[in-house]
Image (spheres, rainbow, N blue to C red):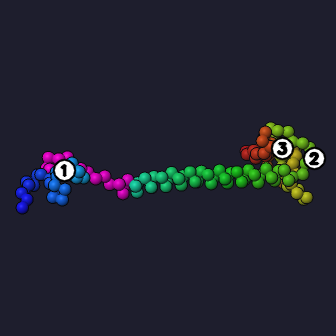
Amino acid sequence: MSTKKPDAVVWDEETSQYNAKLLPYAASLSGPVIDIPNVDAFKLQGVQKASKHLQAELQEIQDQIKAFVASAQETERVYRAHYKFEPIIGENYFLYEGKSGDFLSIIPPEQWRQKFIGQFRLTSEFRWEKIPTT
C-alpha cells in the first residue's frame, strides 16, 4: 500500500516521481497565473486586417490595369489614324474623326472645324499619351 502524499505535492503514481515541473499549469496556489492567449481572436483579427490590405492592393492593381488598357487603346487608335508625316517625340498632335476614319494633325481644334477627339503627345517609349484639355 502506498503512502498518501499531501495535496500540494505533485506525484505521478505511474512513473513514481514528482512531475510538477512537467505540468502545463501551476501545481500550487503560490504558482504563477498562466493565461492562455486567445489565439482564435488573434487569427480572426489577422485575417481581417490582411484581407482589407489585400483588397486595397487588388483595387490598386485593377485601377492600374484599367489605366493601362485605356492607354493601350488610345495608343492603338492614334497609330491606326491616317497621317502623312513622321511625328516627333514630345510634340503635341491633334486627333480628329473624319468620314474615312481618324486622322492626326498639327492643326489645333480652334483653327479647324472637324470633330475633335483629343490632343496627344508621343512619348520616348513610342506610346501616345492623351493630354487633358481644359
Residue 103, how many percent across, how many down?
88, 51
What separation in Å lies between label 1 and label 2 (alpha carbons)? 93 Å
Disc 1 marks a residue whose amino acid type is Ala
Do the residues under discs 3 and 2 have CB atoms within 8 angstroms?
no
Read off the residue under disc 3: 93
Residue 131 shows in the view: yes
Residue 75, how many percent across, how many down?
79, 50
Mark 1, secondary structure of its residue: helix
Magenta region: 28-42
Read off the residue under disc 1: 20
Foreground mark, 3 or 2? 2
Disc 2 marks a residue whose amino acid type is Lys
Read off the residue under disc 2: 84
Foreground mark, 3 or 1? 1
Disc 3 marks a residue whose amino acid type is Tyr
Q: Residue most toward the front?
A: 1
